[in-house]
Amino acid sequence: MKQDHRPEIILALILLTVIIAGVSAFTLAETSVSPLGYQPAGTPVTVTAVIDFPRKDLTSDTFPASHDLVISTGLSGARWEPVLVLDGRQTRLPQENGGTLTIGGMYLSYPGTQELKVHLTLTGTMPADVSPTKDFLRVQETDAQKNILATSSIAMPEVPLVVPTESLLPTTVPTTRKLPTPLPTTSPTPQSPDGFFPVIVAAAGAALMAMRQN
């Protein structure tokens, strides 16, 4: 009896379709950020990247025409300069300003045997609020229903933790020594020496007697 392998073949085809659909149509390569590392708000930053679309066979395109390539950044005052490179020939795409650049699939859909790249130059300034949700560059592939199929990004560095120097010094509590309040000093009232007053009285009496005798 001949076995029917059609269910296994159908299942294998379904799994293969899922695997192909899950593979990203692009890769983010040759990226650079200048200057490197965390920078204060307002610092000019330049980001360059190459978005590569791996070659495929004749049955596939470099990128689905119904999909979009959505590129965004957390930089302020962003300006985009995209260049399409097809088999070594460069074509400048329209320059854009703002936080998001969208390249439609119709600009990226070519026979899978052709070599396709997008050279991207992004300029802007560091924002005042750097958070883990912000990236220097984020590239996403979306389908016709705006579902995100693939994402690749260059993350912004985290804000460095700065510990004040004063907090590293040992804390000392000033000690105040309380001195006792001195008692007020009073000079004793001078007293007449003993016998001084009788001498004065005797002298006065002798002087009076002498005056009467005269």
Image (cartoon, rainbow, N blue to C red):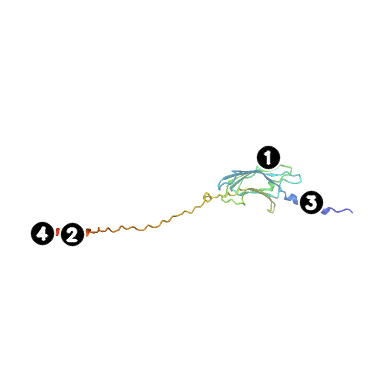
Identify the residue under disc 4: 213
Structural distance between the alpha carbons of marks 4 and 3: 166 Å
**Which quarter of the image is occupied by the N terminus?**
bottom right
**Which of marks 2 and 1 precedes in the sequence?**
1
Q: Residue at 19%, 58% (x, y): give it.
A: 200
Q: Residue at 79%, 51% (x, y): give it.
A: 13
Q: Nearer the viewer, mark 4 or mark 1?
A: 4
Residue 208 at x, y percent in the picture: 14, 59
* The quadrant where residue 87 appears: top right
Q: Nearer the viewer, mark 1 or mark 3?
A: 3
Give me the disc on residue 202.
2
Look at the numbered disc 2 and give the secondary structure of its residue: helix
Structural distance between the alpha carbons of marks 1 and 3: 37 Å
Q: Amino acid at mark 1?
A: Arg
Q: Residues within 10 Å of mark 2 (few under 14, many from 20)?
A: few
Structural distance between the alpha carbons of marks 4 and 1: 155 Å
Front residue of 25/67: it is 25
Q: Amino acid at mark 4?
A: Gln
Identify the residue under disc 3: 13
Identify the residue under disc 1: 89
Left or right? Give the position of 104 relative to 197: right
Residue 167 at x, y percent in the picture: 53, 51
Look at the numbered disc 1 and give the secondary structure of its residue: strand
Front residue of 98/186: it is 186
Structural distance between the alpha carbons of marks 1 and 2: 142 Å
**Which of marks 1 and 4 precedes in the sequence?**
1
**Which of marks 3 and 4 precedes in the sequence?**
3
Q: Residues within 10 Å of mark 4 (few under 14, many from 20)?
A: few
Q: Nearer the viewer, mark 1 or mark 2?
A: 2
Look at the numbered disc 3 and give the secondary structure of its residue: helix
Please, which residue is most extreme toward the front here?
A: 195
